[in-house]
Image (cartoon, rainbow, N blue to C red):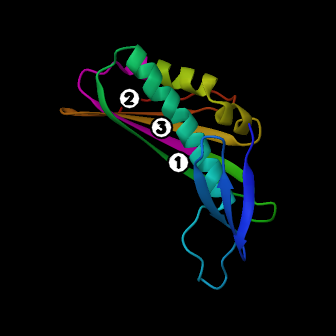
Amino acid sequence: METIIKLTKENQFEAKVPSGAIVRISGADASGTLPPAFRPMEMLLVGLGACTAVNVISILSKMREPFRDYEIRLKGERAPQPPKVFTNILMEHLIYGSGLSQEKVVRALDLAETYCSAFNMLIKATKIERSIRIIENAGEKNLKEEKNGEETQKSDM
């Protein structure tokens, strides 16, 4: 895999990947004059979320789970001093549908994390937690789990 990152103006870059996609990236913008662009640490969260989401949808589809929508929300906490690495990441999965199997959804997320390269790289350096919300027409089931090599906690609310 390769990418080219080119300076376009002061503290503003464009990254081009083999697929042809171009992403704007910026450093700190003390002046407030740069157009909106991803910051590098935001890109890490986006990469983790996208990698996981692509796998979740693929696996749920292969399991023939009747989901109608999916959303992943990520929140990263960072160290207060440089280097401001992620110290904790919460991944909240929202799966919408009727008749979803809680067991299959959890299994799909486990498999998605197994196959997600970004997850496997980041889990070595930071604590990653996940919560699962299965949202059906009749109500909502919540599961909270910790995925950092420690004991996994599950509760059905």
What secondary structure is marked by label 1?
strand
Residue interval drawn in magenta: 90-105
Query: Which residue lies at the image location 39% right of the left edge and 20% below the top edge?
Result: 61
Q: Nearer the viewer, residue 17 or 60?
A: 17
Amino acid type at circle 3 is Ser
What secondary structure is marked by label 3?
strand
Q: Position of residue 74 (x, y in %)?
A: 53, 48
Amino acid type at circle 2 is Asp
Q: Is residue 91 magenta?
A: yes
**Quadrant housing the N terminus:** top right
- Which residue lies most toward the bottom here? 31
Place residue 14 in its image quadrant: bottom right
Q: Is residue 56 visible?
A: yes
In front: mark 3 or mark 1? 1
Q: Is residue 154 visible?
A: no
Q: Which residue is mark 1?
A: 74
- Which residue lies most toward the top here? 63
- Disc 3 residue crowd, few under 14, some 14–19, many 20+, Cα 10 Å: some
Disc 3 from disc 1: Cα separation: 10 Å
Q: Which residue is mark 3?
A: 131
Say which mark, if any, is on residue 156.
2
Disc 2 to disc 3: CB gap under 8 Å: no
- Disc 1 residue crowd, few under 14, some 14–19, many 20+, Cα 10 Å: some
Q: Is residue 67 magenta?
A: no
Disc 2 from disc 3: Cα separation: 11 Å
Residue 150 lies left or right of residue 103; in this view the side is right
Amino acid type at circle 1 is Leu
Question: Is 71 placed above or below 22 here?
Answer: above
Q: Nearer the viewer, residue 140 or 6?
A: 6
N-terminal of the pair, mark 1 or mark 2, is 1
